[in-house]
Amino acid sequence: MDKIGSMLKEKRLEKGLTIEEISQKTRLTMKHIKAIEEGDISYFKDDLSYLRFFLRAYCDALEIDFEPLREELQDSIEDYTTSFNTEALIEHAQIEKGVQKTNEKMKQPQTEKRAKRKKKKRKYKKVDFSLLSFLAIVIVILIGLIFAFVMWFQGNQDKGNDISENKPPVATVPTYTQDPETPTPPPVVVEPPVEEKEMAITKTLEDSGQAIYTIENLKAEDELDIEITFGSNSSFRVLVNDVELSDPPRGIQNYKTVLHVREKAEPNKKILLAFGFMQNNSIKVNGKQLEIPAALVNKQGTAIIEFDVKGAE
């Protein structure tokens, strides 16, 4: 990062441009530009996902090709995040030890409870004859009531049959044919129900640090629920149509944290998830597991996942 910053500063001075002029061309703040030229990557600790976009804008302002600098920038970001994630792994190991000790403490009271339950079961093995005699009386009463109901029902059925035999004959209603001059009504056309299509997620772009997906077959009133489970500590932020959301807020997310991004399915809506550290993160869209490229799942560095909503009606 120091090498890139000094090179950009040297090119700016060769062109006779000031930091303020570069700020006007790139729309970056003067503090951002100074941090880039000084190689201060820690200044962008909460914006690592966007650092390459900042450098690309700076290169465009100086009419320099950004692609030769991409790999060197990525190495600098990964070196910076490695030390951060080493601390996260140590913290995770300490948490696992605490959980193991808690489980060992909980085993002893569970074995005592099981022993007490066995003793209680032995006490109830004696047969309660008074209860059995009460149940027998109840069963006899129920059988008597059922028998009486059946006899009453059969008697009413016989009476109904006698009445139906004495009914007068029913007069037949003459049928009439339709007048040939009367127009025949058109047949009723029943349209088949419209088949609802299942939500479809298609990957449209993939590179070493980014993947773009297209979401189709959603209605405008449907809700889009994106669930993120963090497999490691990472900085995180969400942008919808290039506007950063406050819920969930940007910042560091801990290991095993679960966040939900809920948005209405509107046509051409873009949802961008920016991760400072991508390794082992999991994403679901409306309960459907997202297939993240292998190059991003195990990536120990920054990554961007973008969703483009298409076909919302």
Image (spheres, helix red, strand yellow):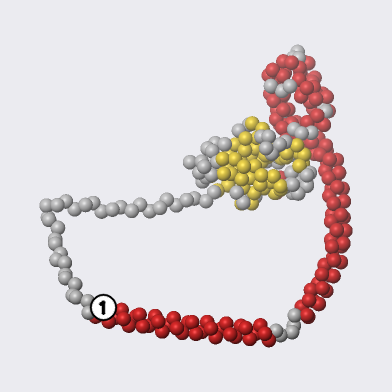
Q: Taking 111 as reference, is 138 left or right?
A: left
> Is residue 79 shown left or right of residue 158?
right
The residue lying toward the viewer, choosing from 126 and 245, is 126
Amino acid marked by disc 1: Ser
Dot 1 falls on a residue whose secondary structure is helix
Count the marks: 1
Camera-side residue: 71 or 121? 121
Residue occupying image coordinates x 74% and y 83%: 125
Q: Residue 203: where, in percent of width, then height?
A: 60, 45
Residue 37: x percent and y percent?
80, 23
Vertical arrangement, residue 70 with respect to residue 262, above or below: above
Point out the image quarter for the N terminus.
Answer: top right
Question: Does residue 176 appear in the picture of this structure?
Answer: yes
- Residue behind mark 1: 164
> Which residue occupies 52% across, 37% down?
267
Task: Tell me if residue 53 comes above or below residue 193 in the rendering.
Answer: above
Residue 115 x %, y %: 83, 74
Measured from the top left, where is residue 41 in percent x and y? Answer: 81, 31
Q: Nearer the viewer, residue 211 or 272?
A: 272
The residue at the point 69 percent across, 25 percent down is 57
Residue 204 visible to an observer of this rendering: no
Residue 149 quadrant:
bottom left
Count residues near mark 1 (Cα–Cα under 10 Å), then give few for <14, some for 14-19, many for 20+. few
Image quadrant where residue 225 sits: top right
Left or right of 160 in this view: 43: right
Residue depicted at x 78% and y 80%: 123
